[in-house]
Image (cartoon, rainbow, N blue to C red):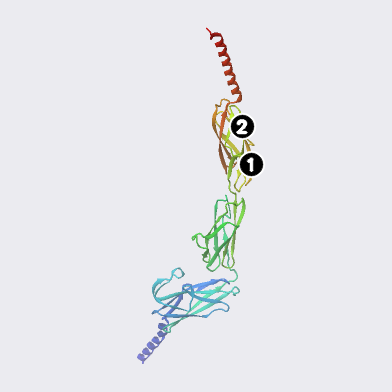
């Protein structure tokens, strides 16, 4: 009797184990089977399918809340089955668990309606292998409607100042305080003609940024103004579109303008004539070809020794695109000999933002009085010689 009872118990044990053995033919797992999500978002579950032998596993969604959408994706397409193959690997950052054997992976994307009610919801996946074994995976989604979370763009330096030729670089922080990973498309609104780019700080060629739930990333904004941009304040708006609402950040560039000054003479001549101890004047023309006003332009000169150069007015202001005249008075030394002398004249703005120079060649000529004195001397010498010959010539 005892032997019969033992045999019966062993038989029941074997019968009880048979479903478990067959059930192990295909398995479907995810590292994170339960997540917290906000209404109007899409959550993604990386799923691993394993089988005892390489085979096809058909996939279906057997249960989901009304109005929800579940998509199975792999290789960039929507899929309805996977094929397992011998593999020894880990599934990466999406799942820290190692898998060994015949496996395949896919992603379950669940889109939650914007009007979804708060509470726990489930999405059920079914898998059926070629050998007839089946598996079921339940995904739990806890919808929170009280505090949806937000995304934000911030920066420590929203305003930059510089000349027109400057390339302005801003750094912004894009934070994602929602319950999901969000892919943000980056865009900007900028003044006409400007060259403005916005990229993740870690990838200069990317036009979007992926930010995990509760994390943030740095966004780099580069702005370059056209060369003819006038001085003033210009606004740039950075947009990050994604998540429950877009995030905006206003940036400001203060253009101080370009400084460009040219100095010439009114008649384009760079030479002057002067007598020893005498004076001559020249009209200097200051041209502001930049986009910023020049203030307090003052002239200096490097004349020869004992010469003097003065300017009137002492300083001038020149608006962008305008001109101003300055009179230069050159006074030669009383002892200056006939010949050419070089004088350098430099105009410089009060803040030294712009300057220009020109070189004048001053020619010293003998005065008319000098010629008359010379002639008189020669005449007197001639008269003296005449009397000398008259008196002593016949002896």
> Residue visible at 62% across and 33% down?
281
Q: Nearer the viewer, mark 2 or mark 1?
A: 2
Q: How many marks?
A: 2
Extreme residue in the bottom direction: 1
Q: Residues within 10 Å of mark 2 (few under 14, many from 20)?
A: some
User: Please, what secondary structure does the residue beneath circle 1 have?
Assistant: strand
Instruction: Report the residue marked by disc 1.
Output: 324
Q: Position of residue 320 (x, y in %)?
A: 62, 47
Q: Position of residue 72 (x, y in %)?
A: 50, 76
Extreme residue in the front direction: 394
User: Please, what secondary structure does the residue beneath circle 2 have?
Assistant: strand
Between the C-alphas of marks 2 and 1, the distance is 20 Å
Q: Residues within 10 Å of mark 1 (few under 14, many from 20)?
A: some
Q: Nearer the viewer, residue 6 or 245?
A: 245
Q: Nearer the viewer, residue 252 or 147?
A: 252
- The label on residue 280 is 2
């Amino acid at each position: 009797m005892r032997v019969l009872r033992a045999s019966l118990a062993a038989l029941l044990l074997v019968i009880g184990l048979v479903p478990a053995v067959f059930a192990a033919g295909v398995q479907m797992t995810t590292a994170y089977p339960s997540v917290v999500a906000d209404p109007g978002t899409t959550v993604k579950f990386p799923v691993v399918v394993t089988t005892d032998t390489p085979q096809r596993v058909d996939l279906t969604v057997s249960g989901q809340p009304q109005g929800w959408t579940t998509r199975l994706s792999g290789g960039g397409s929507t899929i309805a089955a996977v094929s397992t193959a011998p593999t020894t690997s880990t599934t990466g950052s999406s799942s820290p668990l190692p898998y060994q054997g015949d496996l395949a992976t896919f992603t379950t994307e669940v889109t939650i309606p914007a009007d979804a009610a708060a509470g726990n919801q489930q999405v059920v996946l079914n898998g059926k292998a070629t050998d007839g074994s089946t598996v079921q995976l339940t995904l739990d989604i806890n919808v929170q409607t009280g505090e949806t979370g937000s995304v934000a763009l911030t920066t420590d330096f929203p305003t930059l100042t510089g000349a027109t030729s400057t390339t302005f670089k801003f750094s912004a922080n894009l934070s994602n305080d929602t319950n999901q990973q969000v892919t943000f498309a980056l865009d900007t609104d900028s003044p006409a003609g400007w060259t403005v780019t916005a990229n993740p700080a870690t990838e200069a060629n990317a036009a979007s940024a992926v930010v995990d739930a509760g994390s943030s990333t740095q966004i780099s904004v580069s702005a370059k103004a056209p060369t003819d941009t006038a001085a003033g304040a210009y606004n740039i708006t950075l947009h990050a579109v994604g998540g429950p609402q877009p995030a905006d950040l206003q940036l400001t560039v203060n253009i101080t303008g370009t400084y460009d000054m040219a100095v010439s003479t009114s008649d384009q001549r760079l030479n002057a004539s002067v007598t020893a101890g005498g004076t001559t004047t020249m009209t200097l023309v200051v041209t502001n070809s930049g986009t910023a006003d020049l203030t307090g332009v003052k002239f200096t000169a490097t004349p020869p020794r004992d010469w003097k150069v003065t300017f009137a007015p002492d300083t001038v202001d020149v608006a962008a695109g305008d001109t101003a005249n300055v009179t230069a008075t050159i006074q030669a030394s009383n002892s200056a000999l006939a010949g050419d002398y070089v004088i350098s004249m430099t105009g410089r703005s009060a803040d030294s933002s712009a300057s220009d120079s020109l070189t004048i060649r001053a020619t010293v000529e003998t005065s008319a009085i000098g010629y008359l004195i010379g002639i008189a001397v020669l005449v007197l010498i001639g008269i003296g010689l005449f009397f000398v010959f008259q008196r002593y010539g016949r002896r």
